[in-house]
Amino acid sequence: MAEGRRPGHARLMYFGYFMALGAYLPFITLYYERLGLSGVEIGTLAAIPLVVSSATALLWGATADALRRHRLVLGIALLGSPAAVLLIARAEGYAELAPLVAAFALFNSPIVPLLDSAALEAAEESGRDYGTLRVWGTIGWSISTWLVGALIQDRGTRVMFYAFAGVMALTFVASQLGPTRIRVLRSSLGHGLRRLLLRADMLSFLVAIFLLSTTTGAVTAFFSIYLDGLGAGEGMIGLSWMVSSVSEIPVMAGAAWLRRRVGTRGLLVMGFAVYALRWLLFSIITDPVWALLPQLLHGLSFGAFLVGGVTFMSERAPEGLGTTAQAVFTTVCYGLAAIVGALGGGYLYDQVGMAGLFRVLFAVAAVGLVVLWAALRVPGEAEGDR
């Protein structure tokens, strides 16, 4: 019975968490700008959670795997992050915001690795594909970015804080009703980490995704400001984020079909190439309506990259280290690389403007694609080292 509940529970958790995140993440840098913060201050506030996540996500994941307390860790995270967000809503200046943003990141950092590892386990046990479960996160994000964007335009930016907290509270309740995890760590944590990380194929892959993720980190931090600079209102900003997330749905839903035809490596190459194309297009657009077109390519960039990357890590994770492997992926992509992207993006925004920023991002993504191509040619260990 528990195995039969796993896919449904994974869908529900993705839906709830990403619905909450979609109410908050696309609009928080716009909120900072409305408080009068500079580009560097905005970039720094965007980088603080990435620094904290980089330092804590792997620790959270390894602790959950080693102690087999995944539900407890997830529950703490789902309660702590909205508490921090409600305090952020009351802060007024950079000095007040910085420690609260760090607290939010501390609690938020283990959520995605825990959800991904549980979904991968559910997919394997039930014979489903990861993408068909993860797509429910995209659906939740799509609904909230559009709805909250419209609400912000009518009622002000503080709506996002309460929407995030309310949905996270419901997601916490759902998290405590889910089935227990199955896989158990078969060897010492240190031995498993060495088997996972100290390999030529893995190290090369991590370098490649680091390069690409510096570009996505900058865009995450500054895309709403980019649209605002083109003359878009909050409603159009929310619509633009919704368009991008809706474009993920067919890619996620068809990920199994795509992976059978192009393989995990093919998905990764596709994701890198389309990301580079999007950044190039954004660098030449001057009308916010036209910015919706590159957003339609988001599914082929983010969707292919995410499914390819998560699967790549899962295939190489030793038995019982699924959460840890996903924490490594999250730390590199949405931690270390995103720190560089947010800080570098803030500096470039102040120095060369938004169009110049996107031209630099295009060049970095293109270099990342070359590194990925070389990395995928490095012979790796057999995928059966679990």
Image (cartoon, rainbow, N blue to C red):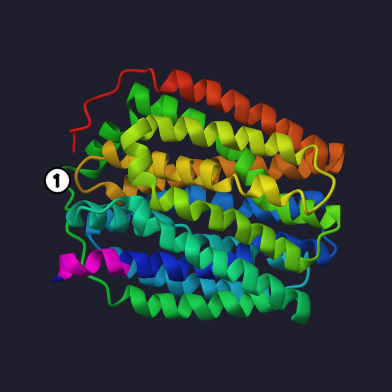
Going by the image, does 23 lie left or right of 77? right
User: Residue at image x 78%, y 41%?
Assistant: 347
Would you say residue 74 is visible in this rendering?
no
Range shown magenta: 2-9
**Type of the residue with mark 1:** Arg
Closer-to-camera residue (92/308): 308
SS at circle 1: loop
Looking at the picture, how far across and down is residue 213, in whole percent? 56, 39
**Residue picked out by circle 1:** 186
Question: Horizontal and vertical percent for residue 232?
Answer: 81, 60
User: In the rendered structure, does residue 356 fall within the stretch colored magenta?
Assistant: no
Q: Looking at the picture, does residue 353 appear above or below residue 79?
A: above
Magenta-span inclusion, residue 7:
yes
- Residue 104: % across, % down: 55, 65
Residue visible at 54% across and 60% down in the picture: 105
**Which quadrant of the structure image shows residue 307?**
top left
